Image (cartoon, rainbow, N blue to C red):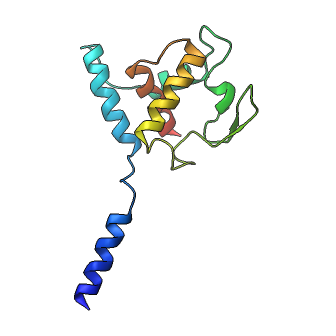
């Protein structure tokens, strides 16, 4: 019976997908990069993140154009009208758990909003804001 239990446990572990990351893992990475980019980096700021999220930058859009002023609520893409699940991890625990998706969407959305990629400081400020909701 003990061997059966061990085999069952082992097969379950092997079949499990890779461990999901947590939002804090991304903050740690963004902080390391921000410190490399700017030796004076002293941490992320949720109020800066909120301002960044809601502001129209050099383009026509802001993050809130699609994700709404309350990213704990569902959004809708401004052009395609495709539904977007809430961005805040408090209401959508799937957010910020996959490095490939996080990098893909930051890259795409920052280029849409800013016409460039976001800095590590900007990503960290926005994520800090989203985690405060």
Counting from the top left corner in percent of width and height, residue 132 is at 48, 38
Which quadrant of the rendered structure holds the N terminus?
bottom left
Task: Judge whether 100 appears above or below 39 on screen.
Answer: below
**Is any atom of residue 127 visible in this view?**
yes
Image label count? 0
Task: Judge whether 45 appears above or below 13 on screen.
Answer: above
Counting from the top left corner in percent of width and height, residue 60 is at 68, 13
**Is any atom of residue 42 visible in this view?**
no
Counting from the top left corner in percent of width and height, residue 120 is at 38, 22
Residue at 38%, 46% (x, y): give it: 21
Left or right of residue 121: residue 66: right
Residue at 64%, 10% (x, y): give it: 59
Based on the displayed image, in which of its 4 quarters is residue 112 positioned? top right
Left or right of residue 106: residue 28: left
Residue at 31%, 27% (x, y): give it: 31
Q: Nearer the viewer, residue 53 or 120?
A: 120
Residue closest to the far top: 58
Residue at 51%, 50% (x, y): give it: 93
Counting from the top left corner in percent of width and height, residue 10 is at 28, 72
Left or right of residue 92: residue 117: left
């Amino acid at each position: 019976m003990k061997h059966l239990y061990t085999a069952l446990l082992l097969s379950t572990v092997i079949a499990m997908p890779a461990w999901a990351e947590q939002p804090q893992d991304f903050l740690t990475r963004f902080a390391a990069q921000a410190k490399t980019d700017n030796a004076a980096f002293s941490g992320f700021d949720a109020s800066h993140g909120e301002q960044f999220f809601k502001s129209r930058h050099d383009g026509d859009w802001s993050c809130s154009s699609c994700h709404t002023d309350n990213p704990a609520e569902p959004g809708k893409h401004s052009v395609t009208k495709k539904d977007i699940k809430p961005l805040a991890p408090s209401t959508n625990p799937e957010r910020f758990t996959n490095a490939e998706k996080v990098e893909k969407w930051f890259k795409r959305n920052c280029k849409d909003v800013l016409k460039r990629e976001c800095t590590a400081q900007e990503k960290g400020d926005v994520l800090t804001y989203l985690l405060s909701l």
